[in-house]
Image (cartoon, rainbow, N blue to C red):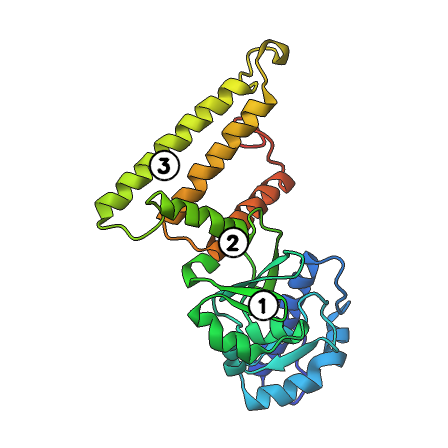
Amino acid sequence: MSIPINHTNLSDRAWVRFYGTWEWVSDEAKKYSDLRSWDSFEDFYEAMFKSFTKAYNLDQECCLVRQNTKVGFHADNCSWISKDHMSHNGYGVPFRCVALGHNNDAYAVRSIPIFAGIHDLNPKVIEDYIPKGIIEHRGWRFYPLRPEYSEFVNSDELYVFIGKPYLTPEIFNQFKDYQQKLGFAKGYPSMRDQMNHMNHNTVGLLTEMGELLREVPHKPWREIEDQPFNEVKALEELVDMIFFTTNTCFIMGWSYAELIVAYAFKIQKNLNRITSGYSKVGTPDHI
C-alpha cells in the first residue's frame, strides 16, 4: 500500500486508517459496476475527511458503512460508526434471520435495524420476537437462522437478496405435517434411529436417481437418438428425488429458513463456477 504523504493534523496511525478505508472502498466498488463511487482518493478525501476526523476522535476503531447497501459509495449514503455501533446494528455478526416479502422475495438479514429502516418496519418488534420463532410483521415473515447456517451466505452485506425459494412456507409445512403423520421428521429416540432413517432416505434417493437415468439420455458414447427419453416419467422421478432430499433435511433438523439459505448458496456457487469458465466434469475447464 503506497500511502500519500500525511499533510494533515491527524496522527500517522489515523492517516493510515483513513487511506486504508479508501483502498477498501475502491475494491468494494469494483464488485458493483452499477454503484457510484469516488473516482480518486482526492475525491474521497474531500467528501469524507472531516467526518472521519470527528468520528476517529470518538473511536479510533471507527469504520465506514453504507446506510443503504443497494446504493453505492458516496457521501449521502456513507457514514463513520463506532465499533460498538457496528455490533449493535449487525456488522461483523452472523446473519440472524430470513425475511420473506410480499412477492416471495427472500433476504438473509444480518442487521435487523438497517433492514427494518429501509422497508419501513419496526425493528423492535422483530428484535423482540425473532428469537422466539417465526414472526409476521406488516406483510413480511421472518424466520430465525441458526448462526452456523449463516456461513452459507457468502456476503459481508447487512442483508442480501437470496432469490425466490422453490418451496413456499405453506408447502414446506404441508410436507412436514405429512412426514410427521408417517412417523418421520420428528424427535428420534436415539441417534441410531436417526441414522437408520437417514440411511433409508439415502437408499431411496439413489434408487430414484437410477430410475431417472433410465428415462433420460445419459450415455455420452451413444447417439442421443438411440437413447430413451420419457419426459413424463422423468419428472415423476425428479419429484420422488425432491421428496427424499427434503425429508433428509428434516432428519437433520433443518428449518425452512436454513433449507432455502442452503439452496440459494448452492445456486450462487454454481453460477460462480459458470462465470469462471466451468462447463463439464472432466473437461479442461473443470480441471
Disc 1, SS: loop
Task: Locate residue 160, reporting x and y percent.
Answer: 60, 61
Q: Determine which residue is flagged by label 3.
A: 201
Disc 3, SS: helix
Task: Locate residue 142, reporting x and y percent.
Answer: 54, 65
Circles 3 and 2: CB atoms closer than 8 Å? no
Single out the mark in the foreground, 1 or 3. 3
Name the foreground residue: 136 vs 226: 136
Image quadrant in which the N terminus is located: bottom right
CA gap, disc 3 and disc 2 = 22 Å
Mark 2 is surrounded, within 10 Å at the Cα level, by few (under 14), some (14 to 19) or many (20 or more) other residues, namely many
CA gap, disc 1 and disc 3 = 37 Å
Quarter-of-image position of residue 69:
bottom right
Task: Say the numbered circle drawn on residue 138.
Answer: none
| Location of residue 100 with respect to 90 vertically, above or below | above
Name the foreground residue: 285 vs 11: 285
The residue sitting at 58% across, 41% down in the picture is 273
Q: Determine which residue is flagged by label 1.
A: 158
Q: Amino acid at mark 2?
A: Val
Q: Determine which residue is flagged by label 2.
A: 261
Single out the mark in the foreground, 1 or 2. 2
Label located before the other in sequence (1 or 3): 1
| Location of residue 272 with respect to 21 vertically, above or below | above
Quarter-of-image position of residue 244:
top left
